[in-house]
Image: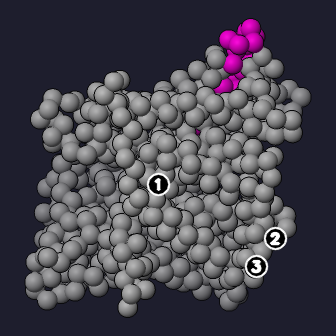
Amino acid sequence: MKRFKIPEVPMRPFIQSGVGVLLGLFLGALLMVIFGYDPIIAYYWLFRGAFGSVSDIMETLAFATPLMLTAVTFAIGVKTGLFNIGAEGQMYLGAVGAAAAAGAITLPAGLHVAVATAFGMFLGALWAVPVALLKMWRGVHEVISTIMFNWIAFHLATYLIVYYLADPGRAERTVPALPSARYPTLMEGSTLTAVVFIVVAFCIGIYIYLWGTKAGYELRLVGVNPDAASYAGVSSRRVTLLSFVIGGLAAGLAGASQIIGRPPAWSLYATLGNVIALGFDGIGVALIGRNHPIGGIFAAVFYGGLRHGSRLMEYRAGVFSELVRAINGLIVVALAIPEIVAIIRRRFEK
Amino acid sequence: MRVLSLLKGKKVLWLLVAVVLVAILIYIVEEFELSPVSLLEGGLLAMTPLALTAVGECINEKAGVVNVGLEGILLISSVVGVFGAELFGNGFLGLLVGAGTGAFIGVVFGVISVYGKADQVVAGMGINIFALGFVQYLLMSIWGFPGVHLVQRNLLVRPIYTPIGQLSVVTIFAIIVAGLAHIFLYKTVLGFRIRATGESPQAVDVAGVRVDRVRILSSTLGGALCGLAGAFMPLAWFGVVVKEISAGRGFIALACVVFAGLEPLLALAAALIFGFSEGFSFAVAVTPGVKEIIPFYFVNMIPYITTLVIVTIAIGKKRFPKASGVPYRRE
């Protein structure tokens, strides 16, 4: 740990992310104009809704919490040379696990939270293992296998909720987490709970793991140069498994955080409506955060802000809130273009 | 001759065995009337979007453009296709609008990949995420109702009656397209250029062929076929458009492409197997006696599990174009 230093931060990634975000917002404005909305008014309410008051900022952080984790899932995949888009399904399983442990068993207060969290993370990681094994043994590309596992997880989670976990009083959701399994809320009237500290600590832990330990170094080495890694005696199979399992732990925690760390439901809806698409959102967040666990925290706050603010935008400007997710996709496309800054600069210099 | 040389591979043998097994199963189910819905009709309907999408992807991957945004194209073109059908008051025009939408996204993706030198997997995934939100925004902005829209009955593309049952025109078109794509890729000059662009863009460039144009053209073709598949789903199959209408079909089509090693005819065969597994799950889901025992949630998993199993078993040594997914830079 002694040798571990925080590296210098170059400016270039910030500029690229900034340009990508601005381009995404600009194209989003075009989509509003096409359908007859006023983008200036819409964006005003979007950002006011996201960061306009202290309670809004707390709410934005509550939206950001799971995204920090699903971003880690994708980012650690990229660091290992994998395109792991399985956070969605792993997150469903994490949510189911947390809902089951938090609603069905009784334990002392402190222990119950820990058990529910751990069980969610465990199921998330478990769901990532077959993908890793298929990749290691048969070379099945993770883009295909993770999506198939996401869909299987969707139907499996719905089945488990409807058949085993449903609240007898309100069948559309699971039995709510017992008070002993809930993270305390941080402010009256806000849905931000203490789980955010666990999540940020997890992200920092991943950062230290990747840049401060030998195992983390090996993991990144496989991503940067698999040949050099195998020459250095690093088993790429072991690293692949490790990358998927850590990603699964993060996604499982993301799912759990929405059950035992998010009022007012404290439960999982049978439609999975309160967790759906958080895994895919995490891909965009990871890319905005340059596939870095710490960058992901800030990117998650930005995108969490968009998600929270979009509700006020929908209410005040009439623009349907899901447009924000489309903007996230546009940002991802823009960030896929490595020379976008150079291209734009060339256009302006002509 | 090319078809014959294809038949040498061991995998092709497995594929033929699988197709024969599918045929036998269909025969048994139909003959003994085990299912209230026709397995053949259901299977062919489910095959159609997969086949169109997979054949399209074969073409653009041959040129070195890997588009994993198929799922997103399917989603967007299904909604825009229905909108087009309502606008023109004709289901067939709706299919065309869907194909046009797909072609447009294909052009954009081609330009991003060729001139932007984009990371194609990331850009494709961006299209998927974009579609996830955009489709809901479209449904809300056009019809003012979240997540679902019923297609008017008079706009549906009616099936035609054939000796083997009701068939959609698009299904027949999809089968013809697979054949045409094979001829196009292996018997025409442009097809040769597309394949060469995927293998060695430098050589193509030296020979005086524009790499950028070939790649954008093939990306457009692939997008158009995918868009047609998207519009087919609400207009000729489900009769309704919902926000998750594609349900992973874009990725199952990708599995078909990987499985087929970029051969359009093999992709068609693979689409038949995957489509059949989906038709089978539909048939099981409504069969009395079965639906009470097996929860419908497990039946829904059948297509995805089939995909995983087939991809796991059949993956092997396939030759993909050398410059697949790699942006071309002139030196």
Of the numbered discs 2 and 1, the one sitting upstream in the chain is 1
The span from disc 1 to disc 3 (Cα, nearest Å) is: 28 Å
Instruction: Give the mark nearer the N terminus: 1 vs 3.
Output: 3
Residue at image x 72%, y 80%?
A35
Q: Percent x, y for residue B293? A: 66, 30
Residue type, numbered disc 2: Gly
Label 3 residue SS: loop
> Which residue position holds label 1?
A287
- Position of residue B189 relative to residue B248, above or below, is below
For the residues bearing labels 2 and 3, Cβ distance under 8 angstroms: yes
Instruction: Confirm whether circles 1 and 3 share one chain.
Output: yes
- Judging by the rendered image, the residue that carries numbered circle 3 is A37
Q: Residues within 10 Å of mark 1 (few under 14, many from 20)?
A: many
Can you give x and y, in whole percent of width and height, for residue B102 in the image? Answer: 49, 76
Residue furthest top as drawn: A108
Which chain is home to disc 2? A
